Amino acid sequence: MQRHADVREREEAYDAIVVGAGFAGLYMLHRLRGLDLKARVFEAGDGVGGTWYWNRYPGARCDIESMEYSYQFSEELQQEREWTERYSAQPEILRYLNHVADRFDLRRDIELGVRVAAAHFDETSGKWSVETNQGRKSSARWLVMATGCLSQPNRPAIDGLERFEGAVYHTGTWPHEGVDFTGQRVAIIGTGSSALQSIPVIAAEAGQLYVFQRTATYSVPARNAPLDPEVQRRVKADYKGFRARSNAEWGAAYFNANPAPALSASADERQAIYDERWEIGGLQFIGSFADLLVSKEANDTAGDYLRRRIREVVKDPATAELLSPQQVFACKRPCFDTDYFETFNRPNVTLLDAKTYPIEEFTVAGLRTAQASYAFDSLILATGFDAMTGSLLAVDIRGRGGESLNQAWAAGPRTYLGLSVAGFPNLFIVSGPGSPSVLTNMVPSIEQHVNWIADCIGDVRAKGLGLIEATVPAQDAWVDRVNAIAETTLYPTCNSWYLGANVPGKPRVFMPHIGFPPYVAKCNEVVANGYEGFKLSPAPAEPALADA
Ligand code: FAD
Ligand code: NAP
């Protein structure tokens, strides 16, 4: 027994440990406090905010509208908040999350600048033993991974980056002091959401901007503007009703989903609906018709419309052609931009085809493709993230029998409800693979997960029990369900990060569960049926202190 006592003395003991202090970790801490649990948050960054702490590239902002891209757990908080723009810019969201940390007195239980390196389940104590990269150890009955779906930067596997003598930036780890590109020759690799937001801003500053595009991107104008006080007043008059309407939508945001299929409309009717939603801007374009992601023929009508819009804006026909996406619309995450396509009319912006002529290597002065060499002062990697699994698998997580999460997920992530993994008791993932997460407005998805986890912990404790874990059959059935839903759609038809296709060697599995309302219904049903698909058991007895 001596050994147990020593270990407990060395380790800091908590009821719950949360990893990450973004939207998910902050609210999780608040809910754990409400259960009277002694909780600790470890955050690798030197500030709270997660995504909005790290992604400070020029033009960074949300593309879900501000009135929705915010917490709904506190009526006072959402009533007090005065958003200034239709889509908030990164500094405003970061200020909001810092305000939340202060308003709910969260900081005293958050440790910043601490990266969790390992988390091992100890079957003797029924607790998680957590180790930081500085070698500090702590233990907790409950472990919540709030490490983010888009927090592990993906760097391209291109030879020789260390040779390049200029400055290198990744959009997901942007310098806090900002970067002045005035007059510089700048190269950006990637044309996903981060690139689309930053390219117009950087182009206005740089002397020359080279854009290396591998896959052209569909984009609809965001139509950002100062937020109309009247809109804000109307939403606040019934914020609950507004949230309920959004939560009833497939993506937990106001898509204003049209239940009619595109193929049942005449060409003129389709055009009118696309025109109307193009003018509104943003998300509602995806809600134009019900069959856009299940029928290729329907999808082509949206693709044709968006390609025509590009040709209308971009003056050089060859550039317009290269900017025109050919994959299924919304199969990769669509973007919402401000003057993205217009930027390619600037004389200082050059679009380069990195699909036909892949980047072969970086050089001292720049890079070389199969076609030519380019020299520049600064390089921006807008190359995205090892999404959904990257931040989890970066931690050495070991469950029962010492099995690592890396082993358990060798052929792709397997979860029950995207919340829990068989063989890893009392470990919860917020917006994990197998949950709607990245296919939704993530703040309500995060809140739904945090509420489910906190209620679950409360229920397990109320029953006098201490352990809950997913069963293998329930997990297998869940994985089958997630795959089966995806197979009924066009989502698996392109090389998206939803499938892990952006990271060389990553198993190709469609990770998110499509559809927020049926997902929430299933989570609620699982609880109503006494945590169906989970095994609940007592925690192992604590060793008697007198023996020590
Ligand atoms: P994060 O905000 O990613 O926070 C996770 C935190 O965990 C990070 O701070 C990280 O440092 C920390 N962490 C990770 N591993 C460890 C470790 N081992 N030890 C300690 N700490 C660790 N979603 C939308 O719905 N709408 C949008 O408009 C939108 N815009 C986005 C714009 C950008 C540029 C990006 C990158 C993402 C965007 N997203 C958007 C998705 C966004 O990630 C989520 O909306 C949300 O912010 C995620 O919150 P989170 O707390 O789950 O994760
Ligand atoms: P991303 O969508 O994954 O885009 C990465 C880009 O880099 C792609 O164009 C990709 O091309 C390219 N790329 C990667 N490796 C390359 C290589 N070796 N050579 C050439 N090109 C390469 O990443 P992101 O733009 O950072 O966005 C990630 C997600 O974060 C978004 O989908 C969204 O969910 C979220 N986000 C949201 C917003 C917002 O508007 N609110 C802003 C930023 C991010 P391929 O397509 O060919 O792989």
Image (cartoon, grey):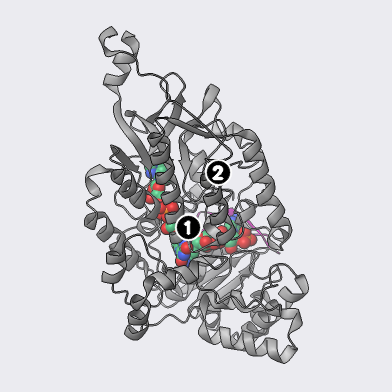
**Do the CB atoms of the residues marked 1 and 2 lie less than 8 Å apart?**
no
Q: Position of residue 117 (x, y in %)?
A: 42, 34
Q: Is residue 325 visible?
A: yes
Horizontal side of residue 361 vs 67, given as left or right: right
Quarter of the picture containing the N terminus is top left
Report which residue position mark 2 lands on: 529
Report which residue position mark 1 lands on: 445
Q: Nearer the viewer, mark 1 or mark 2?
A: 2
Q: Which residue range is magenta in the image?
A: 356-370
Horizontal side of residue 118 vs 360, given as left or right: left
* Amino acid at pointer 1: Ser
Residue at 35% in and 64% down? 179
Horizontal side of residue 79 vs 56, given as left or right: left
For the residue pair 373 and 495, the one nearer the viewer reads as 495
The secondary element bearing badge 1 is classed as helix
Residue at 75% in and 88% down? 266
Q: Position of residue 153 (x, y in %)?
A: 49, 51
Ligand 1 resides in the quarter of the picture at bottom left
Q: Is residue 383 visible?
A: no
Q: Residue furthest right?
A: 297
Horizontal side of residue 349 vs 129, given as left or right: right
Q: Position of residue 7 (x, y in %)?
A: 32, 18
Q: Is residue 25 magenta?
A: no
Vertical side of 532 occupied by 289: above or below:
below
Ligand 1 neighbours mark 1 (CB distance < 8 Å) = yes
